Image: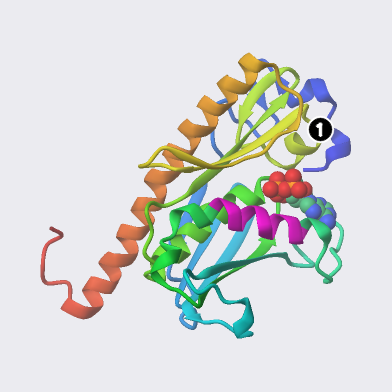
Amino acid sequence: MSIKNYSQEELFKDGVRIDGRGANELRPIKLEVGVLSRADGSAYIEQGNNKILVAVYGPRELHPKHLARPDAAILQCVYRMATFSVDERKSPAPSRRELELSKVIRGALAPAIFLKNFPRSTIDVYIQVLQADGGTRCASITAASLALADAGVPMRDLVAACAVGKVNGTLVLDPNDVEDKLGEADMPLALMPRKKLITLLQMDGRMSKEEFLEACRMAINGCMEIYKLQRQALIKRYMVIREEYEGGEEEDA
Ligand code: ADP
């Protein structure tokens, strides 16, 4: 979808968005857990046209050792976009945006992990965006929390994330790249769904107080929908593991 083909008014017309969705609709989401055999944990997400792969290593020994915390593990996140992930070739050098998003994603995941269980260790999360279409930080958080669970990292909860945008004066769930770039606002939110704790809240653009509260409600509902899909993906993964070990003889408890 090329940005230059759309005026602000065309973004939301007669209750329909440019990709055919209603205002309160997520893009189609596909989640898969345990996709890489060499990582301790891994996950893959497709959310609309976003395609993102996450690998987790650890908890493991940290080098250099002077970076270690004596009372807890450190969480290291690396968010990178492939050169072919966007319309115009992206430079392979790490950009300021990638460094910032690495930090933002770490902040959204850290509250969910029992870091104090693993002093002097590191947990490493590598995120590769293979194809980007808006909302990659949220999709990365959703997939990374699954990859952490797949690695057996003890967690208080999963983390699900999605954004709410504002286009042509209307709040829209899970904006795509065009809506993100041409819209009036973008508000990514990450949630620990069972604990109902928000671990990330950002805002780009302007919303009234009422719009902000409604956007929070929409984003939280979006995260709860994503959480259901995360659980299904984890259950699917563990059914496969169980079949491998038990020959699939026992019924699910
Ligand atoms: P997010 O992906 O979390 O929404 P941004 O708001 O920074 O983060 O980016 C929005 C979208 O802009 C990205 O999802 C991607 O589709 C696009 N984008 C980001 N970086 C580039 C780039 N270097 N070249 C072209 N498009 C980009």
Please state if 187 lies on the left or on the right of 228 as rendered: right
Q: Quadrant of residue 22?
A: top right
Q: Quadrant of residue 153?
A: bottom left
Q: Residue at x 46, y 31 (%)?
A: 221
Viewer-proximal residue among 74 and 200: 74
Q: Is residue 28 visible?
A: no
Image quarter hosting the C terminus: bottom left
- Snapshot colouring: rainbow
Q: Residue at x 87, y 58 (%)?
A: 88
Whether residue 32 appears in magenta in the rendering, the answer is no
Q: Main secondary structure of the magenta part?
A: helix
Q: Which residues are magenta?
A: 98-108
Image: 193 above or below 108: above
Q: Residue at x 63, y 81 (%)?
A: 66
Image: 36 above or below 144: below
- Amino acid carrying label 1: it is Leu
Residue 95 location (% of width, % of height): 83, 62
Residue 72 location (% of width, % of height): 47, 69
User: Dot 1, how many residues are within 10 Å of its Cα: few (below 14), some (14-19), or many (20+)?
Assistant: some
Image: 177 above or below 69: above
Image: 149 above or below 3: below
Mark 1 vs ligand 1: CB below 8 Å: no
Whether residue 107 appears in magenta in the rendering, the answer is yes
Residue that numbered label 1 is attached to: 182
Disc 1 is placed on an element classified as: helix
- Which residue in the rendered view is the most extreme toward the front? 70
